């Protein structure tokens, strides 16, 4: 069984990995310029928002020294699912072509 620290560490690692993927999406949209649709750019902004929510919830847990992980775990899991769903949704959109 994982400790809370290990579980939080895995979430942070995965969040950094998704942040890198998000950076690639932004770069791809910027490279495509006007080829990137407004909807695609909105989807990227939506992912950024969801990413920030997960990070914020992790930061809140860390700042609440001594509070039980169980008080935060549910909210983080929901925010994580929302972030994963946003990434899935953008994969279904037409991708901008690189110039």
Image (spheres, rainbow, N blue to C red):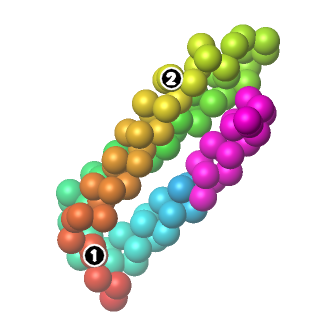
| Residue depicted at x 49% and y 23% | 75
| Residue depicted at x 63% and y 43% | 11
Q: Residue 1 has which mark? A: none
Find the residue positioned furthest to the bottom: 99
Q: Is residue 13 magenta?
A: yes
Judge by depth and name the residue closer to the eye, 40 or 35. 40
| Residue depicted at x 49% and y 43% | 51
Q: Is residue 16 magenta?
A: yes
Q: Quadrant of the C terminus?
A: bottom left
| Residue depicted at x 42% and y 66% | 25
How many angstroms separate mark 1 from mark 2 (CA)? 35 Å
Count up the numbered dots: 2
Main SS type for the magenta part?
helix
Q: Is residue 23 above or below residue 2?
A: below
Q: Position of residue 72 (x, y in %)?
A: 58, 20
Q: Is residue 19 above or below residue 28?
A: above
Q: Quadrant of the N terminus?
A: top right
Crowd around label 1: few <14 · some 14–19 · many ≥20 (10 Å):
some
Q: Is residue 92 above or below residue 85?
A: below
Find the residue positioned furthest to the front: 1
Secondary structure category for the residue under label 2 = helix
Q: Which residue is mark 2?
A: 74
Range drawn in magenta: 1-17
Q: Which residue is mark 1?
A: 96
Q: Position of residue 6 (x, y in %)?
A: 76, 39
């Amino acid at each position: 069984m994982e400790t809370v620290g290990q579980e939080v560490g895995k979430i942070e690692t995965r969040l950094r990995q998704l942040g890198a993927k998000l950076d690639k999406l932004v770069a791809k949209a910027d490279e495509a310029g006007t080829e990137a649709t407004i909807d695609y750019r909105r989807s990227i902004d939506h992912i950024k928002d969801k990413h920030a929510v997960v990070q914020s919830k992790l930061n809140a847990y860390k700042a609440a020294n001594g509070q039980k992980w169980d008080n935060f775990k549910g909210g983080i899991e929901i925010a994580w699912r929302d972030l994963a769903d946003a990434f899935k949704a953008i994969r279904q959109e037409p991708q901008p072509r690189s110039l």
